[in-house]
Image: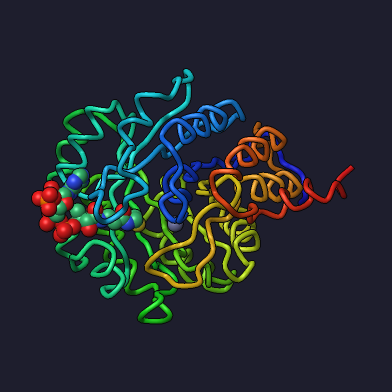
Amino acid sequence: MGYALSAEPQPRIVEVGPRDGLQNESAVVSAEKKAAFVDALAKTGLKEIETGAFVSPQAVPQMADTAEVFAKIQRRPGVVYSALVPNQKGLERAMQAGADKISVFTAASETFNQKNIRASISESIERFRPVIRETKAARLPLRAYISTAFHCPYEGPVKPVAVLPIVKTLMGLGVDELSIGDTIGKASPRDVRSLLKPLLDIVPVEKLFLHFHDTYGMAIANALTAWREFGVTGFDSSTGGLGGCPYAPGASGNIATEDLVFALSAEGADMGIDIEKLTAAARALVPSLGHPLDSRLSRVASTGRHS
Ligand code: COA
Ligand code: ZN
């Protein structure tokens, strides 16, 4: 324990800061600054960056300029630039912008889904059935998010029995990858174990990503539990710990990528990601955000206590 054997599957990170992070920031960040952020992230060793969302601009004004961001980034070979889409219109826009990979999303809680996308869980799946078909026809890889898979801000604890049928449906539709979200950051390692036990009976571990927010400070513990106890290697995170959730009052941002990379490396993972470059990428955004970063490593850096 505490060191990585070379044969051991290593953790992989999908950086979601430019999308899940920035969509939940109240400040308006220009397309130019967003593209600079994405470019800086691509130089850290990250292999996949969710670059934006092609959703309704009325629903999420912060993502209205995602096409511009895609046009401005300097694509780095070997890096996947993905996009979130809610419907066929979003898919068309994403393909036009040259997204390398498509993400669709639903939630395990009916109330959350209604507030987020004005649809029930089954309506949302019906809505993205053609999106999945067209994405596959275009031979683009496909990810599906299930939000509020542990706790819902409106309905409280979400049981694994509510999550599993959605997972089965999505796997049946042929998604390449699932991201299971603790949208309000309230899950504990115990919740993670309760869900992973039945989940890994129906999803191959390499297709599974966990998406933790850090509201109650448990995201790192959850990630380490999933990796060490269950061999889960896929994690979503946001550099700088950006974000929150407009439909989940009080929820803090995603687990910060730099904190996650630090924790996994300390636990023996070979991440190949430059933490200094991550914190620098986030720091460059601070003047646009109007508040200090919410990651532990950025606090360490700003007090100079790490030296
Ligand atoms: N891109 C751009 N515009 C879009 C769009 C898309 N993907 N999908 C819908 N729109 C526009 C429509 O053209 C329409 O515009 P109009 O009023 O000028 O005619 C308007 O949005 C409403 O469209 P409608 O199909 O009735 O959607 P809706 O109002 O029921 O909203 C969603 C449904 C899913 C499109 C919307 O709630 C949404 O985009 N939600 C995203 C939420 C999100 O990103 N959450 C974070 C991820 S977890
Ligand atoms: Zn999230």
- State ligand 2's quadrant: bottom left
Q: Position of residue 259 (x, y in %)?
A: 67, 50
Q: Position of residue 79 (x, y in %)?
A: 47, 26
Q: Position of residue 114 (x, y in %)?
A: 23, 69
Can you say whether 153 is above or below 118 in the image? below
Q: How many marks?
A: 0
**Residue occupying image coordinates x 59% and y 43%:** 287
User: In this view of the protein, can residue 129 be seen by the observer?
Assistant: no
Quadrant location of the C terminus?
A: top right
Can you say whether 63 is above or below 291 in the image? above
**Residue occupying image coordinates x 30% and y 39%:** 102
Does 8 sit left or right of 54 as displayed?
Answer: right
Q: Nearer the viewer, residue 22 or 141?
A: 22
Q: Nearer the viewer, residue 173 or 47?
A: 47
Does 21 sit left or right of 273 as displayed?
Answer: left
**Quadrant in the rendering for residue 135:** top left
Q: Position of residue 228 (x, y in %)?
A: 64, 55
Q: Nearer the viewer, residue 32 or 252?
A: 32
**Quadrant in the rendering for residue 122:** bottom left
User: In this view of the protein, can residue 227 be seen by the observer?
Assistant: yes
**Quadrant in the rendering for residue 88:** top left
Q: How is the image coloured?
A: rainbow
Q: Nearer the viewer, residue 189 or 7?
A: 189
